[in-house]
Amino acid sequence: MPELSKDIVGTKLDPYTFAVERGKVQEFCIAIGEENPIYRDPEAAKAAGYEDTPIPPTFQTAFQFWGYPKIWGDMAALGIDIERLLHMKEEYTYLKPVYPGTMIHAAGEVIEVKIGKMNMVTFKTLFNNEKGETMIEAVMGIVIRPPDA
């Protein structure tokens, strides 16, 4: 495995596409105990001012794990020891609601690397719809524990 380096800043990850399916959103709501009817009932969502049932907060995490399963191999190729990886932070900026039926096109990029006792890598991902409009911006930070920790 290559060694982690600040030289990976600016590296773009492979783009991927994810179809937002109503059933997957429903399963996610059940899994996290989300009971707000705007995420499950189109009529309740419309009464609240939405076009349809929007995805609940954090559902876009599923975009990456279902739509880009090779992320682990790609991280390893960047010098990230995925066996020592810890999730540090996740920040989302919601720009427009995402509804079932939307095709999400995502592309991530390494935006920061800190080398030290515990190495840190930050990624930024833009989630765009089929029109190219950015719906969500995500910034994810990870920490790589040292071998003796």
Image (spheres, grey):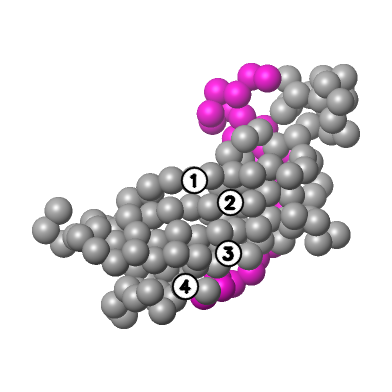
Q: Are marks 2 and 4 in contact (CB under 8 Å)?
A: no
**What range of the chain is rendered magenta?**
11-36
Q: How crowded is the residue under tag 4: few (<14 C-alpha within 10 Å), some, or many (20+)?
A: some
Mark 2 vs mark 4, CA separation in Å = 16 Å
Task: Give x and y (percent) for residue 29.
Answer: 61, 29
Circle 1 residue: 90
Which SS class for mark 4?
Answer: loop
Q: Position of residue 65 (x, y in %)?
A: 53, 54
Q: Report the side of 69 relative to 50 (left or right).
A: left
Instruction: Assign the N terminus to one quadrant of the image.
Output: bottom left
For marks 2 and 1, give the CA distance.
7 Å
> Mark 2 vs mark 4: which is more N-terminal?
4
Q: Which mark is residue 108?
A: 3
Tag 3: amino acid: Gly
Mark 3, other Cα within 10 Å: few <14 / some 14–19 / many ≥20: many
Label 4 sits on residue: 9
Whether residues under marks 2 and 1 lie with C-beta atoms below 8 angstroms apart, the answer is: yes
Specify the amino acid type for callout 2.
Answer: Ala
Q: Would you say the residues marked 1 and 4 are in contact, meaning their CB atoms lie under 8 Å apart?
A: no
Q: Earlier in the sequence, mark 1 or mark 4?
A: 4
Residue, x 38% and y 47% (percent of image)? 88
Kindly report which numbered mark, 2 or 4, lies closer to the viewer in this rendering. 4
